[in-house]
Amino acid sequence: MIKISLVGDIGSGKTFVSKLFRAPCFFADAEVKKLYRSNRQCFIKLKKKFPQFIKTFPIKKNELSNTIKNKSSNLKSIGFIVHPFIRKKLNTFLKKNRGKKIVVLDIPLYLENKMYKRDDIIIFLKTKKKDVDLRLKKRKNFNQKLLNILRKSQLTLKQKKNKSNYVLVNNFNNAIMKRKVKILKTKILNDRSSS
């Protein structure tokens, strides 16, 4: 099984491109949302750590945002609580799809949390900053301060690109990106089978 992970800036289209691979995808952000909605154990741990912010179950996004905006280091503390739950979900996903040729991992802090293995394929999504900023500003509950904190917690784009096996330019055009992904997927399969 070839594990492909997409990395890039926040809002660079990782989820959009992941779906174009037409392979099983693990969407960490979606799993985190489910966790906040349905996992009382996670809620209890977060409430114990941040009683002044985390008050309701299911956990509200604004409670988490306020926790992070209050003190940027709280992001790391939230991660220490949430990541073990997500790693467990990832392991279940990988076991379930063990027989597939390719799986795609859409995990925002994939490199930062050292989740990659030596033979994983890492694809850097290159996008125009103005396109990314425009897309982010359209998001519901967009907050520049929170975005800046999240970006500071990540490797620089140059570092992500340097750790990647491939670079894919994303222009957010569905038809063009489908073709690019199909070509890249074929190249990855051919490269792997010839090595």
Image (cartoon, helix red, strand yellow):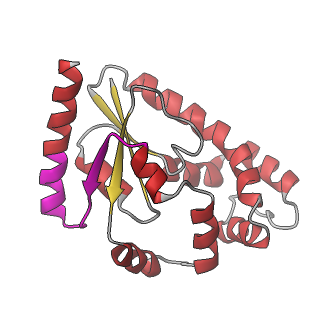
Residue 186 percent across, percent down from the top left: 15, 36
Q: Count of labels shown? A: 0
What quarter of the picture does the C terminus occupy? top left
Q: Is residue 178 left or right of residue 122?
A: left
Q: Is residue 168 magenta?
A: yes
Q: Residue at x 51, y 58 (%)?
A: 156
Closer to the camera in the image, 159 or 171: 159
Q: Does residue 141 sit above or below 106 in this rendering? A: below
Q: Is residue 24 magenta?
A: no
Q: Quadrant of residue 171?
A: bottom left
Closer to the camera in the image, 74 or 63: 74
Q: Does residue 133 sit above or below 116 in this rendering? A: below
Q: Is residue 9 left or right of residue 130?
A: right
Q: Does residue 166 sit above or below 195 in this rendering? A: below
Q: Is residue 24 left or right of residue 71?
A: left
Q: Magenta stretch? A: 163-182
Q: Residue at x 74, y 65 (%)?
A: 72
Q: Is residue 148 left or right of residue 156?
A: right
Q: Quadrant of residue 135?
A: bottom left
Q: Residue at x 33, y 23 (%)?
A: 1
Residue 126 percent across, percent down from the top left: 32, 60
Residue 86 percent across, percent down from the top left: 59, 40
Residue 144 percent across, percent down from the top left: 58, 79
